[in-house]
Image (cartoon, rainbow, N blue to C red):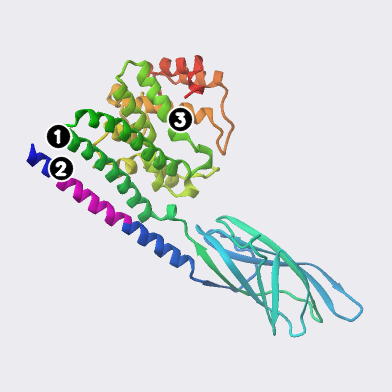
Amino acid sequence: MKKSIGKYKTLLLILISILCALVCAELIIAFHIHKNNQKTVFFSQISMKRPLDLTNRIHFSANPTETLENDSNSFITIMDCSLMNTKRQDFSSWTIQVHVPEDTRINNAWNCNIMLDGQTLSITPRGSENDVIKHNTEVTFGFMLKSKKTINFNAAKIYGKFRQKLLYTKAFVAILVIIVLIIIGMFALSILYKFYKGRLNQALEQVRHENIIIQQTMSTFSSFIDNKDPYTRGHSHRVANYTREMYKRMGFSPKEQQYAYYAGLMHDIGKITIKDEVLNKTTRLSTDEWEMIQKHTINGAELLKNFTILPLINDAVLYHHERYDGTGYINRLKGEDIPLIARTVCIADSYDAMATNRCYRLKFSEERIINELTRCAGKQFDPKIVPVMVSIISDGTVYKL
């Protein structure tokens, strides 16, 4: 008994040490990103023409919309401008410098501040209104210049700072996954340790408490997954609830129902490895993009390959896109060769996809969803489980979960 307790203590200390090291690594990554966010970058733009390929660029455009000649033989040029950001990070604290004729004077400006130093015109954001240019957006601004010559910008210098987000950093997300798994493992070890200490009643109470913590931890992590796509926010929680309810109606124990809930909660963990522009694409996916989407099941299983403390999760992650008729992905399993948890999550996942708005369509009606589930029974879905999901919809339970 003492030897076993000693082993658990040693293992727990090792896990705590690893956890501390990983937390330090996260802080270092966060500090490094913060430091990089303070660096000013420079772009030299040699043409005002809009490029054919606008991906991964910072592009400034300036168009003289009207030129007026006044009584003093001078021109007043009205410039409508925009600064576009198609890079992955936000772009802030920007400054644009352009060359103007020698006798140029500033007449007016809107949505920006401008300053003239000799023949160099500097354009900066006006306060916080347009200081930050988010990914795939642009800011517009303009000004009026007075000169004896017409003004056209042929080139520009652009300065600014990139703001990289932590959740877009692969190393940060990967370490975050490991930290979550270690925390869960530490809670499991603490339960065993207390059990061997003879405090069975306290251990049982701790199980209940730590189940809540595990659920909250996994719920928080699933939120990171869902937040990658605003149209599927809350998707993992809903799939988890539908899966647990189906397990309940199929006669499984409360413990197995809870395992099914965790499996539903983590089924899409592999999506954190997919680029946002692919995951949120509203047009037809290319062959390579579709293959990338399909690999989220394999990537998720790879992330959790050493995580065996909770059953069902790995099977749900790897096989929830298999179809009952054998035409699914990735392994083309058929019928009851597909693990039961994966067949159940598949139905819950498909129901939620049909019952929520997506960027490319509106949600289906209840009648249409039931028709689709029934029509696809034996094809996409297990025909024995479909009636269970239909009953959850028909009696209104689905709206209470």
Residue at 31% x, 30% y is 208
Q: Nearer the viewer, residue 303 or 369?
A: 303
Examine the rendering and report whether any part of residue 331 can be seen: no
Against 288, residue 196 (above or below) is above
Is 356 displayed left or right of 83 in the figure?
left
From the image, tell me which residue sits under label 1: 196
Main structural element of the magenta stretch: helix, strand or loop?
A: helix
Q: Which amino acid type is marked by label 2?
A: Tyr
Q: Provide the residue span drawn in magenta.
A: 9-23
Residue 15 forms part of the magenta stretch? yes
| Alpha carbon separation for disc pair 3 and 1 | 37 Å
Asked if labels 2 and 1 touch by Cβ distance under 8 angstroms, the answer is yes
Q: Nearer the viewer, residue 207 or 333?
A: 207
Instruction: Say which label, 3 or 1, has the lower sequence index.
Output: 1
Is 227 displayed left or right of 171 in the figure?
right
Tell me the tag on residue 8.
2
Please rate how many residues cluster around mark 1, counting C-alpha atoms within 10 Å: few if below 14, some from 14 to 19, many from 20.
some
Tell me the tag on residue 217.
none
Instruction: Say which label, 3 or 2, has the lower sequence index.
Output: 2
- Indicate the position of residue 196 as horizontal and vertical percent values: 14, 34
Residue at 44% x, 21% y is 376
Residue 150 forms part of the magenta stretch? no
Query: Which numbered mark, 3 or 2, is in the foreground of this view?
Result: 2
Against 211, residue 130 (above or below) is below
From the image, tell me which residue sits under label 3: 238
Q: Nearer the viewer, residue 31 or 313?
A: 31
